Amino acid sequence: MASVIQRNRVTVRGAGDHTLVFAHGFGCDQMVWEDVTPAFEKDFRVVTFDHVGCGRSDRRSYRSERHGSLRGYALDLLDVVDAVADQPVTLVGHSVSGMIGLLATIMLPDRFRHIVAINPSPRYTNDDDYVGGFQRPDVLAMLDMIERDQEGWAHSLAPLVMENSHRPQLTERLIRSFMSTDPVLLRKFAEVTFLCDFRDELPKVPVPVDILYGLSDIVVPVSVVSYMAKRIPDARCTSLDAEGHYPQLSAPEELSRKIRQVMTHRVEG
């Protein structure tokens, strides 16, 4: 059985009294943060890791009974937190990791001081009186395409979610990230991500939450951000001057500045 550090390829850098844990979203690994984390390493202990099945995690640690739900990834996150910090941490979670972090706070609230969720969502598919961004049949078609033609899927999805068409190098970087994951595990992670529904969990979140969001994001419309802000007991929303679903790639300086800003406001407030 791999240790947590090996299982999730946990990396710790920087110095400081407080620990920031950066959690990547779907289709990526911890390298997605490489333009963001250096801005924090002088003042904080900075932790990055790979979800099981992603990046250079120990893929043998994948368990369908555990990782068949985002709750299993929340348990993994709690393992990582326990392995790296004795005091409550701040989680910076992108996309699905924002929701994974919220689930983890409900399980063990004393392990977290603050959640910074970047373009998070509790449900990605549309429902009665809820606009999640995707129709369920479209998600099912996407899942099928990942398994049949990972390269075709990556080349079709990446430019849509990255936007920034004037910067094709960003799309190429995202395509490489999509292609680096085993297609079977990528499909399984996509399924538990894009077919999840944790809307009922939002009122249970016991820690302060800051949602950072882009005004142009086909994966997480602004309507989802508003929905979450109304239901999480202590939530604030801050817009990013960034296009697309991956601001840590398209606007790392802006994202770093806003992360630090909301953290400072929470401490001072």
Image (cartoon, rainbow, N blue to C red):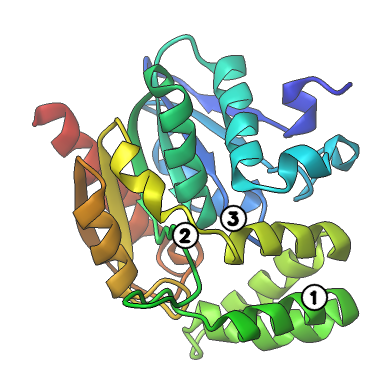
Does 215 appear above or below 225?
below
Q: Which mark is residue 32?
A: 3
What's the CA distance linking mark 1 and mark 2?
24 Å
Q: Secondary structure at mark 2?
A: helix
Q: Secondary structure at mark 1?
A: helix
What's the CA distance linking mark 3 and mark 1?
21 Å
Q: Which residue is mark 2?
A: 248
Residue type pointed to by label 1: Ile
Query: Label 2: few (<14), some or many (≥20) within 10 Å?
Result: many
Could you tell me if the residues under marks 2 and 3 are in contact, i.e. CB atoms within 8 Å? yes
Place residue 263 in its image quadrant.
Answer: top left
Residue at image position (67%, 30%) is: 10
Q: Which mark is residue 146?
A: 1
Residue at image position (31%, 57%) is: 212
Answer yes or no: is residue 33 visible: yes
Does 218 appear above or below 31?
below
